[in-house]
Amino acid sequence: MARRRPLTGCGLEAALAVVGGKWKPIVLWNLAGTPRRFGELRRLVEGISEKMLIQQLREMEADGIVSRTDFREIPPRVEYALTEFGVSLAEALRPLCEWGTAHVARIEARRAEVVSAR
């Protein structure tokens, strides 16, 4: 894994270093509350490729957000769950999710206006 630069800015920089990007918040949200198998996560996170999901899970595991349990069975069974650290991050995302839910109609309407104006 590539070496990361030190975090010297505000706490937002640290939080975004762990959960930044398109997929990590969605993966994190889908792990909140219950452990999931890889295939189940792949179905829940629509549009993500298998390769990208693996990469995101590995990065989240390296950051201590996600734990991976290999049951060493045939067929292979691997389960991902949030660590205590990951649960605290998922709780921090809850207000952002609520904000999005409250404003989704407004956001979609504005985007439609912009597209039709072009």
Image: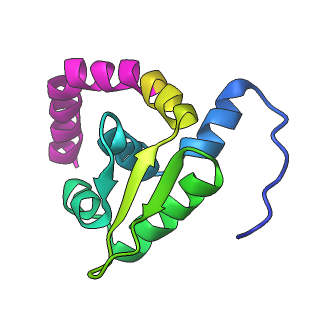
Residue 22 visible in this rendered orientation of the protein: no
Q: Is residue 104 left or right of residue 91?
A: left
Instruction: Give the residues drawn in magenta, as a range.
Output: 93-118
Q: Colour mode?
A: rainbow
Residue 29 shown left or right of residue 19 in the figure: left
Nearest the viewer among 30 and 102 is 30
The residue lying furthest to the bottom in this view is 74
Check if residue 94 falls in the magenta segment: yes
Above or below residue 98? Residue 70 is below
Foreground residue, 28 or 10?
Answer: 28
Query: Looking at the rendering, in which quadrant would you find the N terminus?
Result: bottom right
Residue 58, horizontal then vertical, whole percent: 54, 63
Image coordinates for residue 118, horizontal then vertical, percent: 23, 49
Measuring 26% from the left and 63% from the top, which residue is drawn there? Answer: 42
Q: Main secondary structure of the magenta part?
A: helix
Looking at the rendered structure, the number of numbered marks drawn on it comes to: 0
Q: Is 75 placed above or below 13 here?
A: below
From this viewpoint, is residue 77 visible?
yes
Position in image of residue 111 (x %, y %): 22, 38
Tell me which residue sits at (50%, 68%) in the image: 55
Q: Is residue 51 left or right of residue 34?
A: right
Q: In the rendering, at what x and y percent does residue 21 appear?
A: 50, 51
70 is within the stretch colored magenta: no
Residue at 78% of width from left, 57% of height from top? 4
Q: Name the residue nearer the viewer: 77 or 18.
A: 77
Question: What residue is at 20 percent from the left and 47 percent from the top?
Answer: 115
